[in-house]
Image: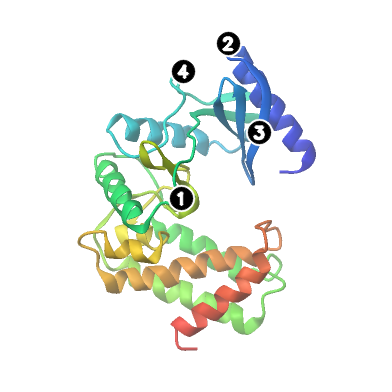
């Protein structure tokens, strides 16, 4: 967020939490991207703040609450307040439990796979309207094809990304066995807590094969998840890499060191596809 938006978003979170009877004397910024994640003290609430047009917050709250109720390994909403989305000053604010990190910063591949398997089992019990994973692949393809949005992408690399997204999206889309997925269960969306690994950030939920989710996890995690089709997983890894590489070439992308990573990942895709 821009500096002016960060100030307004922070004020909206503080005002919201204070109005609910929780004390706020200090604010710690934990993450700043399209959403602002704050730790509010001394009440120790984790607040996620986004522009009001980001109505996916309601979906995320609903899914997270239902998964938590079924015992899935997910971060919980703050139990001291009503589990809903709050609107204030042009922002939506959601309030979550803050978890202290324990042990290594990242969850081990085996624990990551075990938690993801339990999450998937819980997700199979939910019936919620979500896009198919191929819709997200199509978004990446449109970005790659848009020279105005990706002006620095060389034509040979544009062709490589476009062909990879098109062909692997079709191959994975035909493999069957689809269910509700997290969408982006990468290490940054898994907390190492005293309660074990907990998943956060459900705004990217979609339908697809479990291998699509596993492609976001550490590579070794695929060895610990039962019943995985390793051939499909390999294709999914390249497909997911092509998607995140495409986003790094968006002229509006603010990912730290994103252009260098985008160049590095293009080399990995080229090697994987024998180019």
In this rendering, position of residue 273 left or right of residue 227: right
How much space separates mark 3 and mark 1, taking CA atoms? Answer: 22 Å
Q: Secondary structure at mark 1?
A: loop
Mark 1 lies on residue: 104
* Residue pointed to by mark 4: 82
- Residue 151 position, x and y percent, is 72, 71
Q: How many marks?
A: 4
* Front: mark 1 or 2: 1
Q: CA distance from mark 4 to mark 1?
A: 33 Å
Earlier sequence position, callout 4 versus callout 3: 3
Disc 3 secondary structure class? strand
Residue 129 quadrant = top left
Kindly indicate the quadrant of the structure image that contains residue 52.
top right
Residue 201 against residue 93 in the figure, above or below = below
What secondary structure is found at the residue carrying circle 2? loop
Residue in the picture at 27% in, 71% down: 230
Disc 1 to disc 2: CB gap under 8 Å = no
The span from disc 3 to disc 2 (Cα, nearest Å) is 19 Å
User: Could you tell me residue 204's position as x and y percent?
Assistant: 46, 48
In this figure, which residue is indicated by the disc labeled 3?
28
Q: Earlier in the sequence, mark 4 or mark 1?
A: 4
For label 3, count other residues whose C-alpha is less than 10 Å away and answer few (under 14), some (14-19) or many (20+): few
Disc 4 packing (10 Å; few <14; some 14–19; many ≥20) = few
Residue drawn where x is 67% and y is 75% of the image: 153
For label 2, the residue is 21
Q: Which residue is the extreme one toward the bottom?
A: 275
Q: Cα distance, mark 1 to mark 2? A: 35 Å
């Amino acid at each position: 967020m821009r500096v002016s938006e960060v100030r307004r978003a922070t004020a909206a979170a503080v005002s919201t939490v204070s109005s609910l009877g929780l004390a706020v004397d200090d604010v710690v910024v934990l993450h700043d991207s399209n959403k602002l994640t704050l730790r509010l003290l001394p009440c120790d609430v984790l607040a996620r703040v986004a522009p009001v047009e980001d109505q996916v917050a309601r979906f995320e709250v609903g899914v997270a609450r239902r998964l938590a109720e079924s015992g899935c390994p997910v971060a919980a909403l703050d139990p001291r307040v009503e589990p809903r989305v709050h609107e204030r000053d042009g922002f939506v604010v959601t309030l979550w439990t803050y978890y202290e990190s324990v042990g290594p910063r990242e969850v081990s591949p085996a624990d990551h796979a075990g938690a993801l398997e339990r999450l998937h089992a819980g997700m199979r019990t939910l019936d919620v309207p979500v896009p198919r994973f191929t819709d997200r692949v199509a978004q990446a393809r449109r970005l790659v094809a848009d020279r105005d949005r990706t002006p620095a992408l060389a034509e040979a690399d544009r062709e490589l990304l476009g062909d990879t997204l098109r062909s692997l999206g079709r191959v994975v889309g035909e493999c069957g066995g689809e269910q509700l997925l997290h969408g982006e269960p990468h290490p940054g969306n898994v907390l190492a807590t005293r309660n074990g690994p907990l998943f956060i950030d459900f705004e990217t939920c979609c339908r697809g094969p479990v291998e699509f989710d596993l492609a976001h996890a550490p590579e070794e995690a695929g060895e610990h998840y039962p019943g995985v089709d390793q051939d499909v997983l390999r294709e999914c890894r390249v497909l997911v890499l092509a998607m995140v590489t495409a986003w790094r070439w968006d002229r509006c992308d603010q990912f730290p060191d994103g252009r260098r990573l985008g160049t590095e990942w293009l080399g990995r895709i080229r090697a994987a596809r024998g180019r």
